[in-house]
Amino acid sequence: MPELPENEAQRLTLERECLNRTIEKAELGDDVSYIELPGSNELGRLKGRQFTETWRHGKNVFAGSKSGPWITVHLGMTGWLIPFDAPDDTPDHTKLLITFEGDRRLAFRCPRKLGHVRVIDDPGAYIGEQGFGPDALDIAKDAFCKVVGSTRGAIKSALMSQDKLAGIGNLWSDEILFRIGVGPERRANELSDDELEDTFDTMRELLKKGVDVEADYAKLPDTWLIRKRDEGGGCPRRGCGGTIRRTKVGGRSAYHCDTHQS
C-alpha cells in the first residue's frame, strides 16, 4: 500500500501538472461499485473551479483552493493519480476522470479495492474528523516519544497506527526497525529513551530520503531492506551475515533480520 513517500510524490505530481486549470467536468469511470467515489452532486461542485493548492497528511492527498471544495484521495492498495493530455487514451481501470479546459486530464486509476476519492470543504477539519494522528514528518520528537513510548503493543504496530502517527505502513516500519536494529515484535513501551529517540531520528531521515527520490526505490542504497526484502535472503547490512525472516505482527507481514535486530 502506498505510504508517505508515494503520496508525497503524488502531491508533487498534482502541484506540477494540475494547478490553476479550470475544471470542465468530473465523471465516474466504469466498474465503480466496489470503491467509494463522489456522487453526482459532489462532482458537480468541482465544475468551474480550480485546484490552486495541494496538501498531504499521512497517506491522504488533497487538492483544492482556500474557498473549497477539495478532493481528498486515498490510494488504497494500487491507486494512482495520472495526469495526461488528450487525445491520449484514458488509462485502464480509471474510476474518476477530471477534465480541465484545454487538453489536460486527471485520472484516478485503481485496479483493486480500498482506495477512495471524496469531495470535502476543508482538509484540516477532515483530518480531525477522521482521527488521524500527526503526520510522520511533522510530529515533534517529544510528542513522538510520548505517543509511541506509551504503547503496550509491538513497536511495528505502533509505527503503523494512523491514529498515533499518520503516513507509515508495512514497508517503512520495517525499514526503520531494520536500520535501528530493533525487532518488530518488541513492545514499544519497553524501548529505552535512547531507542525511542533513535527511532524518531531514523524515521525522519529515511522518510525524507524516500521523498527526495519521489518513491523511486531503485535510487535507494542497496544496503536498505527495501531493496532486498526477500524472505530467506541475506541481510543487506554490511558485515551482518544474517538472514531476512518474515513473521506476522498484528496481522501484518514483518520482514526483519534474524541477527542484528532484537
Image (spheres, rainbow, N blue to C red):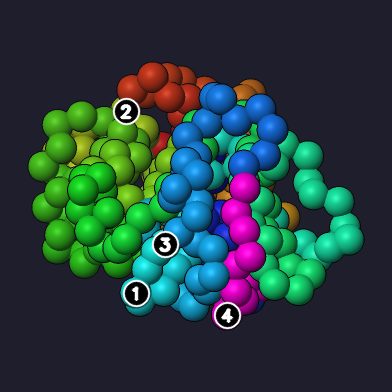
Estimate the x, y position of residue 78 in percent, counting from the top left.
Answer: 62, 38
Q: Earlier in the sequence, mark 4 or mark 1?
A: 4
Real-space CA distance between mark 3 and mark 2, rounded to the nearest whole angstrom? 39 Å
Secondary structure beneath label 3 = strand
Q: Nearer the viewer, mark 1 or mark 2?
A: 1
Marks 3, 2: nearer the viewer: 3
Locate residue 217, reporting x and y percent.
Answer: 66, 54
- If you read the primary sequence from the N terminus, does the residue marked by circle 4 or circle 2 appear first? 4
Instruction: Give the mark nearer the N terminus: 3 vs 4.
Output: 4
Q: Residue at x 34, y 40 (%)?
A: 160
SS for tag 2? loop
Mark 1, other Cα within 10 Å: few <14 / some 14–19 / many ≥20:
few
Q: Which residue is mark 3?
A: 70
Residues shaded magenta:
17-27
Circle 4 is placed at which residue position? 20
Q: Nearest to the eye among marks 4 and 2: give it.
A: 4
Dot 4 lies on which element?
loop
